[in-house]
Amino acid sequence: MADVNDKLRILLTGEIDDKRFAELQAIAPKAEMTFYDKQADMEAAVEDADIVAGQLSAGALARGKKLKWVHSWAAGPNTQLYPEFVASPVVLTCSKGNGAIPLAEHAMMLMIMLNRNAMRWVEGQRNRKWDAFFHGELNGLTVGIIGAGYSGVDLALKARAFHMRVLGLRRNQKPTANFDRMYPRDQLHEFSGECDFVVVTAPKTPETTDMLGEAEFKAMKKTAYYVCFSCGGVANDDALYRAITEGWIAGAGLDAHGVEPLPEGSPFWNAPNTIVTPHNGATTLATKARGYQIFADNLIRYVAGEPLINIVDKHMGY
């Protein structure tokens, strides 16, 4: 960590307005701090940088001989985890947790819409048709949450408020508030079979890529729904599409996709009982504000010589 008397060189990109820039300068008044509108301009100055907040290419990383810390404005720093960065000693932090609240809200919205067949009401309004029908309710249903990070924990709290039973699946079995039971990975099929909704909140890592395939979807109830808002690719797209169209499951709510933007010709656009949103669940001003605050708090820690938070395990991927 840097001594407070060091002349730090800090390069910033992202949505930093004048007020926030002044706040950061006040945290590190001895630092030389520069904001860049364009990543290319920032990377051109990286040779003398100690800290970068923003995306950094492999070429710029190689030129950044003084670099000690890079902060990703993204919650999931996948694009920063190229081999050269993983192998480097540069510390990587990210903004994980900044979108937990709106992502959990988005999952609740998708579950309610799927459970109540809300698209039928949307179609009725579009056609000026008064189409009342019997629909479901979340009360008493079981949601299974894959991943118990920030968004998974917040979703568990919200689901409990809807009187749902909440199951979790993650690498360790540490008891967590608002989860009725936590399952290990080797009990994925048992976990899936208990759920009326399976919601993926976990990041895409080598360990989670394609963890949901044909066998896993067939282990779910035929009346159950799949919801994903964290990362596409945790479910195998071919298996997911077959699960929806062949009736292995009842439908899906998809905010994160295996290929993004979702191609115009993707069959998921017209998949039955499926709601598609454009990886938009956490696109709120409050998410941006929380991401900025994570970096600001870490900068306070850095100049004080204290341990950083939100450090990414570059080998694990989160």
Image: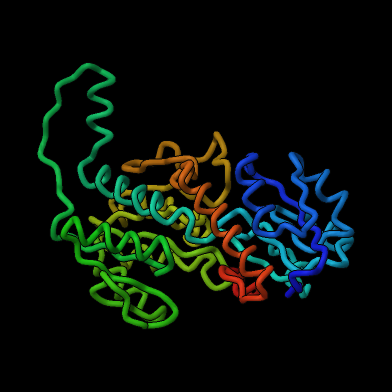
Where is residue 93 shown, x and y percent of the image?
63, 65
The residue sitting at 58% across, 45% down in the picture is 260
Query: Does residue 1 sit above or below 77 in this rendering?
Result: below
Which residue is more in the foreground, 5 or 161?
5
Question: Could you say which quadrant of the image residue 131 lies in?
Answer: top left
Of the 4 image quadrants, the one containing the C terminus is bottom right
Of the 4 image quadrants, the one containing the N terminus is bottom right
Query: Does residue 117 sit above or below 296 in this rendering?
Result: above
Question: Could you say which quadrant of the image residue 59 lies in?
Answer: bottom right
Q: In the image, is 159 to the left or to the right of 169?
A: left
Q: In the image, is 292 to the left or to the right of 170?
A: right
Is residue 76 in view?
Answer: no
Which residue is more in the foreground, 179 or 144?
179
The residue sitting at 27% across, 28% down in the picture is 122
Is residue 254 in view?
Answer: yes
Where is residue 220 shown, x and y percent of the image?
30, 64
The residue sitting at 76% across, 56% down in the picture is 10
The residue sitting at 14% across, 42% down in the picture is 135
Residue furthest to the top in view is 128
Where is residue 119 shown, x and y percent of the image?
28, 34
Q: In the image, is 78 to the left or to the right of 225?
A: right
Query: Does residue 203 sit above or below 265 in this rendering?
Result: below
Where is residue 192 shown, x and y percent of the image?
31, 68
Which residue is more in the foreground, 4 or 237?
4
